[in-house]
Amino acid sequence: MANALVVKLLLESVFQLINDKIVLIGGAKDELDNLLQEINTLKAFLQDNDQQESNSNLWKIFVKIIRTQAHKADDVIDKFVLEAKLHEEKNIWKKTLDLGRHIKRVNNLAKGIKDIREKVKEIRQNNSQVLQPKPMLNLPKRLAREPQDIFLEVKNIVGFTKEANEVMERLVGGTEEVECIPIVGMTGLGKTTLARKVWSDSQITAEFSNNIWVSVGQSNELKNIFFVILKSSTGPNQEFRCNGENELAKVIASFVTEQQQQHRCLIVLDDVWASELVDFFKNVLPENKKGHRILMTTRRRDLASCASERPYHLKFLTGEDSFRLLEKRVFDNGRCRNDLVELGKSIASKCGGLPLALVVIARALKVNQTVYEWKRIENNFWQYVVKENDTTSCWKIVEASYESLSSEMKACFLYCLAFPKGYDIPFQMLVRLWMAEGLIESSPKKFSSSKDKAENYLMEFENLDLVIVSREITGSIKRIKCNDIFYEFYKMEVTTESVFQLLRLKPDLPSINDPDTSRRLHIESCDLSHFISRIPSAEHVRSFLCFSSEDQDLDQQIKLSSDVDIQLIPKAFPLLRVLKIESINIPSLKNLNQLFHLRYISISGNFKELPAFFSKFWSLQSIIINTSQPTLNIKANIWNMSKLTHLKTNKPSKLPLPSTQKGKGSSSLQTLSKISPETCNKDVLGGASNSLKKLSIQGNIEDSLKTNSSTFEGFQTFQKFESLENLKLMSDACCHSNAFQLPKALFKFLLKLKKLTLSKTMFGWEEATKLGQLPCLEILKLEKEAFTGSIWKPEEGDFWKLQILLIHNDELQIWKASRYHFPELRVLVLKCPNLGSVPAELSQFQQQSIITGPENML
């Protein structure tokens, strides 16, 4: 991941410094311009060779040199800016006293930039052999695997009898047209083994007179694959003189037509990575009503779905089958000794139903069959399963999925492993962390495109079973989790690529002095206090992430955690960009005032305000504050922070007036959650821009609603929020006025609103019907006491896009609705103990989930 991406991050820093901080850099601009030219040259080469990286030692050494120099340049540039910024903040008297030392420090930093530029130039000159252009056509290509490279022998297959019968039934049956039956599943599940079992079965050999096996792999060279098919069909000594794939395809088609007049042909394509290959074969086999078949194995879900409407999904082995396979491999089809059975079952369970892992660990168990050795293997399970340089280990099979990713995708995927094993990562948080780390584009103006890119990456990871994705009912990604089975495999790559360093007290706290391996630190909250008490200075550290080891929600973590004074963190890590330690209670924010390079901060504590100095953090993109106070007073000028897109607090916040802040507002905020109702007026929200997509309002709603009109003043400002998609309006206490009406501005301006949540607002049910006028509304959550009254009668023609409806109401007794009121409804969640009955037509929705009674709630 490191080469092109690390240089790209360095370029970002230099560009920002030259373009945005011209006043700070002063006379060093020429040196930075020269450095920029050298880096650009290097970046262009690395981008051209992103998919052509060699595994040679020469290349690896070259990449390490580039990474080291890029990190040094990054450090020097950030220190330069920090020095200039600290000097700029001093008063005239202190500036005068410190002028000599300041000039000396600036000169030293400028000299550092020059030295790095010369080193980059030297790298280019001394590595001319490595830096030679490599045309794609001359690169060595991965060849198709040979048929004998099958990991599990057919004779030792366990647990595939049912699966084989189901696949054979589809091959033999079906239509008379050419059909493709894909076997799809993650790496190591035994797709090839199952296909081999089916291919060699007597029923298949009797039904299909010509059975051809092609081990494809990541090679897409049709010419080579076609030659394999022809030689399998006509004999190894037959010669063919054909130019190109099309001529070979015609030869295959004519051969099948002439030689197989009364018989069927079966072609097995093992380990397919490209959909074009299957499409080509479907066109090659003649449509002669003989029922020719293509059996395909692939690890890509999207490819299998394109090849067939009914792909065959291979599942994990059961616990019983796992132990049977382990037993068969260790004892050569014999029985496991009684004293080893329990240990064997425990080791088999660690393999997670993955045949590949079972076969690998069986080799180790077979060498020495004693209780002592088996216990040692159980305690060091992953050391035996994952061996990077062992061609028989799981890694050599698993790495193919990872190697198929682009350099940027690899970086994003490996970053996911910074989270603890089994951690459900919120999608929005992951996207913002990727942006803060520079792994994907972080421009506020292009946030939507960055989010789309992140979704595409995660879908690719899901296709390869690298992650497990959970989605909203609307299809949008909600959370992702690294696949536990492969977590340990890719941890090895995390170490190799120096993605982050894990800090643990036991056996010993590792050193963080290496600027290449310790740029991102990850620690569990239980070790944080001890680490801070002995924290060394490491100005190269860019990210510090702390995760709770407790299985508790955030409020529980903050309540149970003791205060941790983090004042040493800013001193030790002055160039920090990402600070995520929300699982620990921090007593004060004042010690963070010099972290000018912050891009992402997520913290918790007993905070009363967000200090004004946060306005000075020119690169800050995301602020997540959790406080135990009832409200949070925002002193920082968030309206003038051009990079800030996300401000989220667990308690209502009071926003500053733009008129009280210096500078012209240039807000890029897209998330504003939560704010107090009194903040919702044109004087305050006037500083926000029309980029706002998510807004949450919580507090004393009743005082903010005008009882003598249908106007909620805050909504009048929403005429500029044309992009708002998610709105929450939550009252801390139930409103008691009967004159409340939904603001007209809600229907006039928020025409792109997709999700609306109301709580304790106590509107009348006739107001709920008006919500059907929102043209894009997909999710409506009416939490407790959002509406008052016993009868709701919607009108036909409304809610025509609504997919999810939640109603939590103790008063509702009669609901006169039908499918005509909610034509697209997919999920209905009711917590209405006094509701007489659910409308019959709504209860018949196929994908609907209905919950009634006080014991259930969404």
Image (cartoon, rainbow, N blue to C red):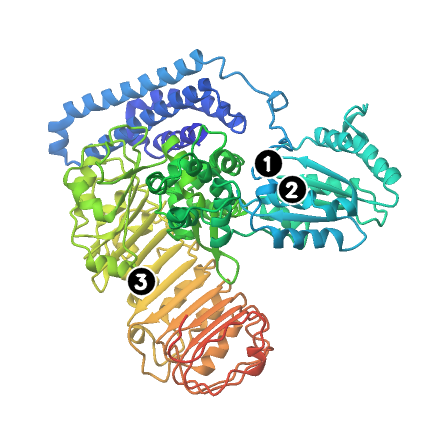
Q: Which residue has dot 1 on it?
A: 150
Residue 550 point in image, percent of width and height: 27, 55
Residue 310 as seen in the image, left or right of residue 129: right
Q: Secondary structure at mark 3?
A: strand
Residue placed most toward the observer, 393 or 202: 202
Residue placed most toward the observer, 472 or 643: 472
Considering only vertical position in the picture, is 392 above or below 697? above
Residue placed most toward the observer, 377 or 850: 377
Residue 230 as seen in the image, left or right of residue 436: right
Residue drawn at 71 percent across, 32 percent down:
225
Instruction: Classify 10 Å Cα crowding around label 2: few (below 14), some (14-19), many (20 and above).
Output: many
Which of pointers 2 and 1 lies earlier in the amino acid sequence? 1
Q: Secondary structure at mark 1?
A: loop
Residue 781 point in image, percent of width and height: 43, 71
Given contact means CB atoms under 8 Å apart, are the residues at marks 2 and 1 in contact? Answer: yes
Q: Which residue has dot 3 on it?
A: 675
Q: How many marks?
A: 3
Which image quarter: residue 712? Answer: bottom left
The kind of residue on which mark 3 rests is Ile
Residue 299 as seen in the image, left or right of residue 550: right
The kind of residue on which mark 1 rests is Ile
For marks 1 and 3, give the one nearer the viewer.
1
Q: Which residue has dot 2 on it?
A: 196
The kind of residue on which mark 2 rests is Arg
